[in-house]
Amino acid sequence: MDLVGLTPDTEESKSLLESLPFSVTFDGSQALLTLPDGSKTKPEALLAKVIAEMKSIAEANLSKSIPEAAFAVPHGFSPSQHTAFAQAARLAGLEPLAILPTPSAALVAANLDLPTPEN
């Protein structure tokens, strides 16, 4: 997921790219992954396929359509990574209601099952 929204001009990017077992090139500031079959794809497009599969599984289990969702991303995600993640969600057919850092998402999830006070 760190490749989503990655730009080639940071030390973090350079360090990450050196550790990958596959090739990443850049078309301007857009990362392109070289897949085992030799084709190239954007990280957002690959993430969209993963999100679409998760959406499909959830819809099958819930027996209803899911048009929107909230997402948890690593705490250190940059604004460009948040934007790219939102684009991937939309490509997968989901409107992102919120993109939360993992600690915040855990807090929200932990409070979902709390009883509500009666008025």
Image (spheres, rainbow, N blue to C red):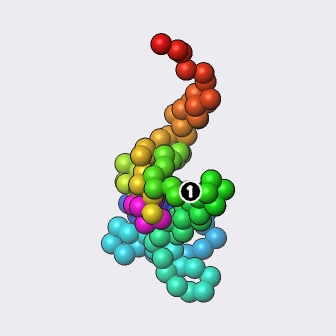
Type of secondary structure dominating the magenta stretch: helix
Q: Nearer the viewer, residue 15 or 22?
A: 22
Dividing the picture into quadrants, the one containing residue 26 is bottom left
| Kind of element beneath mark 1 | loop
Give the position of the N terminus as an image quadrant. bottom right
Q: Which residues are magenta?
A: 87-92
Question: Who's the residue at 37% across and 54% down the image?
Answer: 83
Q: Nearer the viewer, residue 118 or 97?
A: 118
Q: Nearer the viewer, residue 94 or 47?
A: 94
Dividing the picture into quadrants, the one containing residue 53 is bottom right
Question: Who's the residue at 54% across and 69% down the image?
Answer: 49
The x and y percentages for residue 27 are: 37, 75
Considering every residue shown, the one lying at the far top of the view is: 119
The x and y percentages for residue 77 are: 46, 47
Q: Is residue 63 visible?
A: yes
79 in relation to 63, above or below: above
Q: Which residue is mark 1?
A: 64
Residue 52 on the magenta span: no
* Amino acid type of the residue tagged 1 in the rendering: Lys
Tally the marks. 1
59 in relation to 46, above or below: above
45 in relation to 2, above or below: below
Mark 1, Cα crowd under 10 Å, few <14 / some 14-19 / many 20+, is few
